Amino acid sequence: MALFIKDIDYLPMTGSPQLKRGSIRIEGRRITAVGAISPQWGDEVIYGHDKLALPGFVNGHCHAAMTMLRGFGEGLPLREWLSRVQPAEAALREEDIYWASLLAQMEMMKAGVTCYADMYFSEECSLWALEESGIRAVLANGLVDDDGRGEGRLRAMLQWADHYRDDGRGLVSFALAPHAVYSCSEPFLRDIAFEARKRQLPLHIHIAETAAEQESCAAAHGRRVLPYLRDIGFLDGRVFAAHMIHLDEEEMDIAAEKDVRVVHCPQSNMKLASGVLPYRSLRRRGVTVGLGTDGAASNNDLDMLEETRCASLLQKVASGDAAALPPGEALAMATREGAKALFLDDQIGTIEPGKLADITILSLWRPHFYPRNDVNDVMSHVVYGAKNGDVHTVIINGSVRVRAGKCVDIDESRVYHEIQKRAAGFWRRV
């Protein structure tokens, strides 16, 4: 299968943001040529008039099947929110998780997301959904042992990941995902880290989402979260951590030293009143920072364009500096830096020959994209003005998955019908 995107404005995101114009050739799963390419035809030609191509958005932290609990627990801080959400989650059945995952994948693709990192349970249901949707994913069952059943969960996850290590398309990879320090014992965290290093799997965890988390860790272990995780060897592997809000100077130094990669979830953090990421302090130390939506129960959507906008605006208001987190830097967080946060930057995150063809194309034929004069206008228009409805085409792994705003491989009407029907049964059980 060969695709040819002809005469389009594009943001390769390979360095400092620079708007370019040219064509993009895709053969099989990979980009083979970019720029001034002599006219060529493929199995499909996508014409670039009044469109913009950029690397697909990377949602670095998500609980996809929480679409079934969209907006649940409104108006509560994290601890109280969790105390309501977790009992409700116990009522989810596997078929609920399948349809909720497919709904999430559909929502993300229609908003230009080509890859997401998930942390939930019964992730095999997400894998089944992915077989239909064709999105790229880093899957991980959330691991806890505060109920005494952690070891069984870990062994089941390892068996599952080992079995599905190669899906034949290169769309699926795996992580090990201990939920948090407060829900996992020290021996359990050590075991998880050992197995991750043994299998060369990344570790996906929540860290320092609230001040209360830091206080409870200090009370239980005599140290704050990052020194504690460092001292037990957890940070010796490849770690990407959601939130990382409540950090002191020592912890930010540890994050830099141990190459802990951060996934910032600004909308969820704002909604739960958790706090503001110390973005500039982390970046000054060279820490990688990507973006994530968190789950739809605390967001309430999975829209990375909104997340990018909020990340930039939140840093400006928090710092009192209107120049903080400019548009190009924010867009890099949603693409190239997001891929790096998931340890996938050798494969995705930029538009250049050799990379896997994960590309989002926006229609610029919209009032909020006019007038356009130079690269700064385009960058600011995308970050501060673009809507998920502007997503025209989404290419994942070299295949068109969204065309003219509609999912190619998903019966959208059926998903809406099934999710509504199963949600009714779910809420009767809660």
Image (cartoon, grey):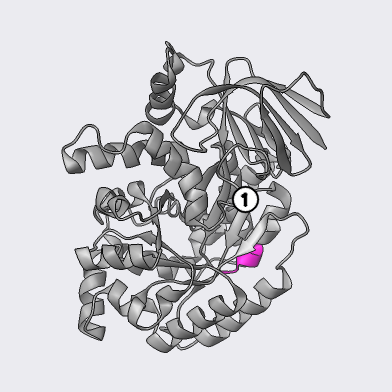
Q: Position of residue 128 (x, y in %)?
A: 70, 59
- Hey, which quadrant is residue 224 in on the image? bottom left
Say if the magenta span includes residue 123: yes
Q: Residue at x 40, y 83 (%)?
A: 146
Which residue is identified by label 1?
Answer: 347
Q: Main secondary structure of the magenta part?
A: helix
Q: Nearer the viewer, residue 221 or 55?
A: 55
Asked which quadrant contains residue 9, the reply is top right
Q: Is 228 on the left-hand or right-hand side of 163?
A: left
In percent of the image, x 46 and y 65: which residue is there?
A: 430
Q: Amino acid at mark 1?
A: Gln
Say which element carries label 1.
loop
Residue 303 seen anywhere in this rendered image of the structure: no
Q: Residue 333: x and y, percent? A: 43, 44
Q: Residue at x 62, y 20 (%)?
A: 8
* Residue 375 versus residue 329 in the image, above or below: above
Above or below residue 140? Residue 44 is above
Q: Looking at the image, which residue is at 53% across and 26% down?
A: 390
Rendered-image quadrant of the N terminus: top right
Left or right: where 252 falls relative to 414? left
Above or below, 419 relative to 123: above
Magenta segment includes 150: no
What is the x, y in percent for residue 202? 53, 67
Can residue 198 be seen in the rendering of this structure? Answer: yes
Magenta stretch in the rendered image: 121-125
Viewer-side residue, 49 vs 410:
49
Residue 177 vs residue 411, the one in the foreground: 177
Residue neighbourhood size for the residue with mark 1, other residues' Cα within 10 Å, grouped as few (<14), some (14–19), many (≥20): some
Q: Is residue 30 left or right of residue 197?
A: right
Q: Position of residue 338 (x, y in %)?
A: 48, 49
Left or right, 309 with reference to 406: left
Q: Can you name the residue that lies furthest to the left here?
A: 320
